[in-house]
Image: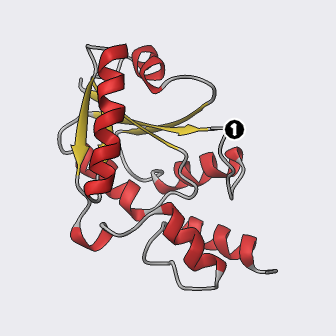
């Protein structure tokens, strides 16, 4: 069985993330989606909420497991889970440059671990968690950008602003 790992803070998870995972399942038997606590980064949603939203996003997709982790390198999590590859999404040239640096460091730390890149569908290429948060903050419609549970969670956060 081939298994991949997608790591992120998912603050919040977007349809772009979901698309990357579903594309991955075309090549892999199983995908682990790992939600990072990442205490050095200020988050909109607390860790438990992000984890719950990611679990809800993949609830009906067979072959996906969602976990949470904190204070560890991605390669350590990957080796612990015995995955075959790391999964990354690339929307544009800026993402590619950043991801190449991360992949090279991961290769040095874990030479056995490959990074596999996926491009989002054209309709999802512009979606980022940052854009979603910004649009939601100003009461814009994000329902086409994120899973339903995320739309509702964003409305709750920004309803009093």
Picture mark count: 1
- Looking at the rendered image, the quarter that the N terminus falls into is top left
Q: Is residue 4 visible?
A: no
Instruction: Tell me if residue 128 comes above or below residue 31 in the rendering.
Output: below
**32 above or below 12?**
above
Q: On the picture, is 25 further left or further right than 109?
A: left
Task: Answer left or right for 69 relative to 157.
Answer: left
What coloring was used for the rendering? Answer: secondary structure
Q: Residue at position x 76%, y 80% from top?
A: 159
Res 124 → quadrant: bottom left
Return the x and y of residue 93 as percentages of the image width and height.
Answer: 25, 56
Residue found at x 50% / y 70%: 131
Residue at image position (33%, 52%) is 95
Towards the viewer: 54 or 100: 100
Which quadrant is the C terminus positioned in? bottom right
- Left or right: 15 in relation to 24: right
Would you call the spot at circle 1 few (<14 residues within 10 Å), some (14-19), or many (20 or more)? few
Rendering coords of residue 117 (x, y %): 23, 43
Please tell me which residue is depicted at 32% across the width and 55% down the height of the picture. Answer: 94
Question: Where's residue 157, x and y in %?
Answer: 74, 70
Helix, strand or loop for disc 1: loop
Relative to 117, does residue 12 appear above or below in the rendering?
below
Q: Which residue is mark 1?
A: 39
Q: Residue furthest right?
A: 160
Q: Nearer the viewer, residue 62 or 152?
A: 152
Q: Is residue 104 visible?
A: yes
The x and y percentages for residue 4 are 32, 31
């Amino acid at each position: 069985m081939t298994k991949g790992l997608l790591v992120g803070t998912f603050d919040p998870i977007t349809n772009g993330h979901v698309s990357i995972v579903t594309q991955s399942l075309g090549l892999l038997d199983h995908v682990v989606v790992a939600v990072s606590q990442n205490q050095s980064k200020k988050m909109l949603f607390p860790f438990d909420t992000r984890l719950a939203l990611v679990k809800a996003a993949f609830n009906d997709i067979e072959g996906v497991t969602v976990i949470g982790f904190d204070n560890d390198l991605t390669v350590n999590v990957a080796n612990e889970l015995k995955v075959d590859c790391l999964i990354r999404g690339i929307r544009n040239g800026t993402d590619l440059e950043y991801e190449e640096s991360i992949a090279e460091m991961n290769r040095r730390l874990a030479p056995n671990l490959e990074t596999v890149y996926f491009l989002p569908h054209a309709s999802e290429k512009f979606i980022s968690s940052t854009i979603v948060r910004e649009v939601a903050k100003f009461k814009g419609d994000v329902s086409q950008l994120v899973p339903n549970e995320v739309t509702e969670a964003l409305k709750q956060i920004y309803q009093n602003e």
